[in-house]
Amino acid sequence: MLQTAQRGKKSKKAAPGKPSGKSAGVHDRFVEAFRWMLTARILEDKLASLYRGGMIVGGVYLGRGQEAVSAACGMFLQKGDVFGPLIRDQAGRSAFGEPLLDVVRTYLGSVKGPMRGRDGNIHRGRPRENQLAMISHLGAMIPVMVGKLMAKRMKGEKDFVGLTTIGEGGMQTGASHEGLNIAAVEQVPLVVVVTNNHWAYSTPNEREFACANLVDRAIGYGYEGHKIDGTDLNQCLEVIETAVKRARAGRPPQLVVAEVLRLAGHGEHDDASYVPQEMKGQPFAQDPVARTEKFILGNGLLNADALKQMRAQIAKEVDEAVATAQQEDPPHPREEDWRSMSTGDLLDRPQLG
Amino acid sequence: MAVTYLEAIREAQTKLLRDDPRVFIYGQDIAGKFGGAFKATKGLAEKFPGRVLNTPISEDAMVGTAIGAALEGMRPIVEMQFADFSSIALNQILNNAGTHYYRTNVPVPITVRLPSGGTKGSGPFHSQSMEGLYSHYPGVVVMTPATVEDAYTMLIDAVAIDDPVVYCEHKYLYYHLKAEALPKDSFPVGKARIVRPGRDLTIVTYSAMLHEVIGVANELQGEGFEIEIVDLRTVKPLDTATVLASVARTGRLLAVGEAFPWGGVTAEVISRVTTEGFHLLDAAPVRINAKDTPIPYHPNLWSEHRPNRQMILTKARQILQE
């Protein structure tokens, strides 16, 4: 059962040497978010190495460079809220409560994973537990989120919110336009977080859109817009928290646009040699994990030992998840039921090709 | 009291909204006093406030929204204004709804209504028959009701099915086709119906073409031939057993559909019969479809673009003489 991650208690334990007093809550939250960022980084480094070792087929898609904004996306969702993550949202998925095993099992194709070898990598989800399973066609999940939220409203649920993410590349599809618009028409409690990582695979911003900043679209769609530095965890937390609160309170849908640099290829098959050197020196190109770590040490939120412990603990959890999933069976074509629908007697002769 | 095909669709939706709180209808121009381009939802928005909702012209988002609502336990019906515009929503219907159960083990119970097929003067973008295209992809049921009774019961069945259903309702039948009353019983989903028994030739068809074929059979009866007519009702799943059993009785097969000729339902019927029932055939099977051009505007062209009674009659006579 997937649940949103436990807040408060757990992070207090994980944060020895925290400052006391009024700022403790804010600091706890900051350290907790960092933990999800670090979890994503360590897990994804492991996935990349499994891919290079030929243990993962297909592809591996990393959220490197997007961990701060992604973690913030998962941090403010509660039980009953809906998360619609996309390709580079490991930090947010973990913060929302996705177990490491779901990730590793999906990448390795274990039959015990949520996708059972039928789909892989970042397409995983648990729709019954409010984590949507993305398809590759960008923008398609925005209206799906709208429908989830409309249905909750029809059923009389209250105080829920949905958060979905997309990149600046995905913002340019017709589906995104339709989805963003219909969300505002339906006035659902929605936050859309757009991470501009400056590259749609190998295509730079100037061939993607021509407005000054994508947040300018907020007014056109009837959203409230927010612009953030996606490498600054403080900003990410504050702004996304505000956006989630506003959506929950019944204000119009919220559009948050974060600027980062994708610090990896499109996938691990891609060396991203097309990214010019000078771009890597831009402020938005900072590594959010390194920046946050420096802030934590510099401000005494954690000491070096505690950080080291945190890192070791996460690495252990990741290794355990990988070891478990590696021992599990991959799918077998003879055990596969080859059923595309749940209604068995309406299948069109599934035994025949 | 006669009931038209269109009224049957409206009555089915009335019943669904009345009996099942999970049902809502989502589409363009369907609410208010207007009640839809063809009035299939007329009066329903007033009768069921908040459950018959107008949408922007956003076919992709309409279906995407329905998928989300279905995942949250609702039973949405999406009305496409014309089947032709559902091409904008192919991604949501086929890549999202159609893959969802296989990928996640969670089915998506949406019903997408497609006002389909040609009528005089409707031209290339308001006349299409898309059942073959939807059937090509896994994960969806494709219904093509040909009678008032089926229009009613199959729409109710569609909403009850836990998986995505593409419900192709034929616009040509909306006003012309009438029944005495709404049916009390339904014929099982996924089963073809022998509309009329015969011994000389099996004609397999569905949707509006059924009525052309009945006309042909009547005419051939005067010439001493008994034509067996199979109405597929759902084209996916395709009731191959009923078709094969019919060909076993007659030894001859003609498949008639209104969609474009490359691939599609009639090709599938003939492929299955020739690969699985070749020994049953006394003559080469034949199919008739629309022509391989966009659907023309002018009635003079349109009436020759789609299969018509004369074309079917000519082909049927040829097969019978073989």
Image: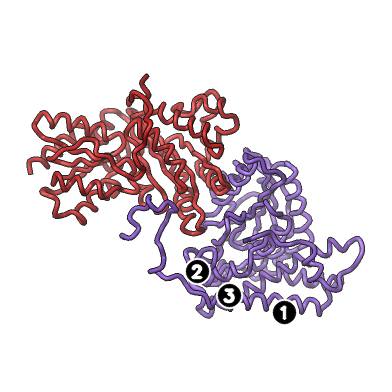
Q: Type of residue at label 3? A: Ala
On screen, residue A105 versus residue A261, left or right, reads left
Quick one: SS at disc 1? helix
Quick one: SS at disc 2? loop
Q: Which residue is mark 1?
A: A312
Q: Chain of mark 1?
A: A
Residue B120, compared with residue A241, is above or below; it is: above
In space, the residues marked 3 and 1 are separated at their CA atoms by 19 Å
Residue A176, compared with residue B216, is above or below; it is: below
Q: Colour of chain A?
A: purple
In space, the residues marked 2 and 3 are separated at their CA atoms by 21 Å
Q: Colour of chain B?
A: red
In percent of the image, x 54 and y 54: which residue is there?
A138
Relative image position of residue B113 (x, y in whole percent): 44, 38
Q: Type of residue at label 1? A: Ala
- Relative to the observer, which residue lies in front, B123 or A44? A44
Mark toward the viewer: 3 or 1: 1
Please say whether residue B290 is visible from this viewpoint: no
